[in-house]
Image (cartoon, rainbow, N blue to C red):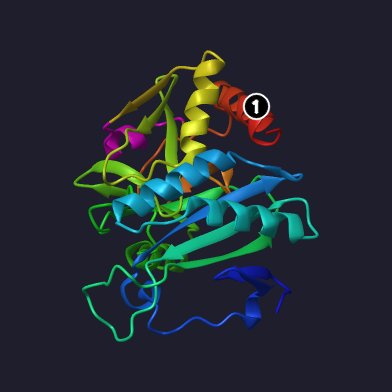
Amino acid sequence: MDQIKAVYQGNFDLLENIQVSPLSRAYTFSDSIYEVIPFFDENIIYFDQHITRLKRSANAVDIDIDPSIASNEILQLIKSCEFKSGYVYYQISRGVDQIRNHLYKNDIEIEYFGYVKDHDFINKKFKVLVCDDIRWGRCDIKSTSLLANTLMMNQASQKGCNEIIMHKFGSITEAGASNIFFINNDIVCTPKLNNNILPGITRGMSIEIFKRNGIEVMEGDFSLDTLSGASKIWLTSSTKGMAEVCDIENLANDIKDQNALFNECKSVFNKEFFSL
């Protein structure tokens, strides 16, 4: 096993040495939230925005976290690693019960856990499968409750795909671990935020970058038919950056090999994302 550096309850050690109780509410109820904070060439990408979203998720599930603990441990993990590019996975759970109980006590000790991993920000392309969005109704919270995502993405993998695009009643929501952008009629489009869509840091950053460079972005409700007519589709996330969709397994589409607007978006995105 790789010598992955980690932290649990303030104790820094190798990941393989960390032990967590089976009565952690993260384990029994997915009663936990998380963030993935990327860094490239020793530069942390949108650190403050990730901490702000971590606090928002904690507030949404009524976990009274100390954000300074998370911030300091994330920074220390990055400082301790021997590589220049990677990410920190950081998770906070409500704590450990004395015995499994749906009703939580307010005096249990909050669990803070994280690890740092190297990562190559390669220009990867994705083949996706379109799926019904069967997730719970608060996907805007970055919760560890990801069973539906896991099931759908493994079903997609069995069909030779490495991501999914989800929809509710024909309206596009997001991918399994990413937000969605596409070009329709020479306009950059992305589903508008709601309870079914995580406010991705890279999503928000992309919109800011595009608009600052004079590229029109439309946020709205988009159907699968609209996606079918898209000339270019891509996904955004902290570890994917801006990743092109090359094919959709079960949706007729008109994706082009080359697109001038996509190339412009990619150019201005990479210039900022990899130089923060």
Q: Residue at x 53, y 50 (%)?
A: 126
Q: Residue furthest left?
A: 169
Does residue 125 sit above or below 33 in this rendering? above
Q: Residue at x 25, y 59 (%)?
A: 134
Start-end of magenta stretch: 221-231
Q: Which residue is mark 1?
A: 267
In the picture, which quadrant includes the N terminus? Answer: bottom right
Residue 269 visible, this angle: yes
Within 10 Å of disc 1 (Cα), the crowding (few <14, some 14-19, many 20+) is few
Q: What x and y, as percent, mark residue 57?
A: 37, 51
Q: What x and y, as percent, mark residue 114?
A: 57, 64
In this view, the residue in front, 191 or 224, is: 191
In this view, the residue in front, 230 or 197, is: 197
Q: What x and y, as percent, mark residue 153?
A: 42, 62
Tell whether 9 sits left or right of 228.
right
In this view, the residue in front, 240 or 127, is: 240
Q: Residue furthest front?
A: 107
Q: Residue furthest top?
A: 214
Tell me the quarter of the picture where residue 148 sits.
bottom left
Q: Residue at x 37, y 61 (%)?
A: 149
